[in-house]
Image (cartoon, grey):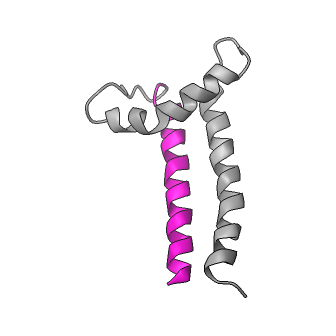
Amino acid sequence: MEDAIIRGLYAVFTLYMMAILLYWVAPWMHVELTDSRWRWLARLVDPPVTWLRKRMPYMGPTDLGPLAALGIVWLARALVLPIAASIISPA
């Protein structure tokens, strides 16, 4: 049971990281994020990316907001999962 919870958390973090990557490369793949099929992706990823964009220095036409969000989610996954594992199944 404990292992399933940890794997579930890992899957949630990983799926969110994949959503950020898809959001980042969507303009290069000519995916219109305002289309009804893809609107869920913008609603899921846009709030944290917009928050990060406002706090990052101006880098010209390069958008590093999704990359920063990806790094933060990766770091959160690396920190949260071992802590959750130690709480759920103490040795």
Give coordinates of residue 77: x percent, y percent: 65, 57
In the image: residue 27, left or right of residue 80 = left
Q: Count the marks: how many?
A: 0
User: For the point 71% across and 14% down, which residue is it?
Assistant: 58
Question: Eyeballing the image, is 45 above or below 5?
Answer: above
User: For the point 66% across and 61% down, which residue is it?
Assistant: 80
Residue 6 within the segment the image draws in magenta: yes
Kindly give the residue lying farthest to the bottom in the view shown. 91
Depth check, front residue: 74 or 18:
74
Question: Eyeballing the image, is 13 above or below 59?
Answer: below
Give coordinates of residue 86: x percent, y percent: 69, 76
User: For the point 63% across and 28% down, which residue is it?
Assistant: 52
Question: Eyeballing the image, is 60 above or below 78?
Answer: above
Look at the image and tell me in which quarter the C terminus lies: bottom right
Kindly give the residue lying farthest to the top in the view shown. 60
Give coordinates of residue 22: x percent, y percent: 48, 39
Give coordinates of residue 18: x percent, y percent: 51, 48
The image quadrant that residue 57 belongs to is top right
Depth check, front residue: 8 or 88:
88
Q: Main secondary structure of the magenta part?
A: helix
Q: Which stretch is magenta? A: 1-27
User: For the point 54% across and 40% down, which residue is it?
Assistant: 21
Depth check, front residue: 16 or 82:
82
Question: Eyeballing the image, is 60 above or below 14?
Answer: above
